[in-house]
Amino acid sequence: MMKNTPWIALACLPLLSTLACGGPEQRASFSSDGGLTFNDSSNNSDGIETGDSNTDSSDPTDTNTSDSTDSDTNDTGLKLDTLDNDDGQTSADDGAGETGCKAIDFLFVIDNSGSMGDNQANLINSFPGFISKIQETIANVDSYHVMVAKSDQYWNDCQIECAFFPFLCQFGDINACDGAPTVCDETLGAGVNFPIGDDASNMYCDLAGGQRFITPQEPVASLPQKFTCIASVGTDGDNSEMPMASLTEAVGPALNGPGGCNSGFLRDDAVLVITIITDEEDDDSPGTPNGWFQNIVAQKSGDGSGVVVLGLINDTDAGDPVCSAESQDPAKIREFIEMFPNHIKGSVCEANYAPFFDQAVDLINTTCDEYTPVG
């Protein structure tokens, strides 16, 4: 799909590499068990809500447990052991029967609408400290995936703009638009590796291994730089934000299965850490909070124990909110977050997200210790 924007020149930046991404052949269906029961939520002394909540989930959904694939160990990056499965795919050694996660899959769902410039900058500034503390605190885990999905599916069609403005795109025999966009660049929930537009990276992020997410092949020293590149999704996104649809697609079987845009991102032995950052309610994604919840837990043993959800959203429900009184109440997103036994909510309007992520590390550590990988 194409979105018209005022930054034609930026859209025609040269690609450093031609991306490859096969589309899924079919979408699986899944009907999840209901009757999940968790404890009530509680507020901590820092004003960042954490805790468990009750839900009776019985709605059918349209997802299935995905296959796990992975990258080989690289001497310059974080360790990742892989095994060949019966289908010839590689998957992380799941350590069936053992308690404790072996890896962590980080998914950041970032609102890329026009009001999110400062929020994206705050997130990017918080990441180095966050990942550093993760590595220090969770010593037994040294395998990380980090992926970003944005809240829309638009990617400006450079081919069309270059046809009308060839002087912006032709440099001798080189056409700067060759290879852009791919199918995955225009797929909701696909990992971002070439953000374009106002306030975006406007470059191909050249992730090690050629995936649409950061893998253990990435040298540790380059993690902040690479995250900055993929997380700078910009502010030219559609104003009809769909972060919840993007989230459920990002971890669903269609995109994670063989040939999918995010193939290999989600692993059985990994705790899934979802960070949602938006300053709006989601009124455009299909489904309900219960359905979104079921879509996610269906990928992680069906009970949500291997999922941590971090929500940076409008704090309209707080006693002393940081966001303005005119801020839209994200009631559906908040309900979704509170369904998970392991969750934290923070205000997207805070000037500094570091305290939020410091507390998140402790929750992730506890979740990882108690997680029993799928076997």
Image (spheres, rainbow, N blue to C red):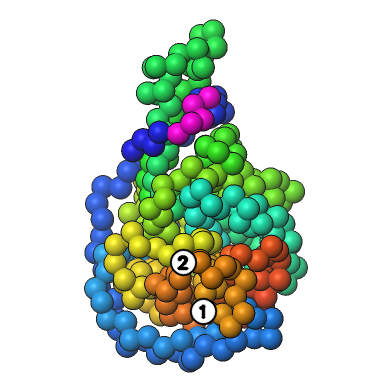
* Quarter the N terminus occupies: top left
Q: Dot 1 lies on which element?
A: loop
Residue 74: image x %, image y %? 65, 48
| Residue highlighted by disc 1 | 317
| Identity of the residue drawn at 37% across and 76% down | 302
Left/right placement of residue 22 relative to residue 233 reads left
Image quadrant where residue 21 sits = top left
Compare marks 1 and 2 and give the one earlier in the sequence: 1
| Identity of the residue drawn at 46% across and 86% down | 53
**Image position of 73 with respect to 346: above or below:** above
Which amino acid, by three-letter code, is at mark 1? Asp
Residue 214: image x %, image y %? 58, 50
Residue 299: image x %, image y %? 39, 68
Q: Main secondary structure of the magenta part?
A: loop
> Residue at the top extreme?
172
Image quadrant where residue 101 sits = bottom right
Image quadrant where residue 369 sits = bottom right
Please give the label number shown on residue 328: 2
Residue 291: image x %, image y %? 31, 72
Q: Dot 2 lies on which element?
A: loop
Is residue 259 visible to us here?
yes
Which amino acid, by three-letter code, is at mark 2? Gln
Left/right placement of residue 24 relative to residue 221 reads left
> Residue at the front extreme?
326
Look at the image and give the residue range highlighted in magenta: 5-9
**Image position of 139 with respect to 43: above or below:** above
| Identity of the residue drawn at 48% across and 50% down | 113
Residue 189 covered by magenta stretch: no
The one nearer the camera, 68 or 155, is 155
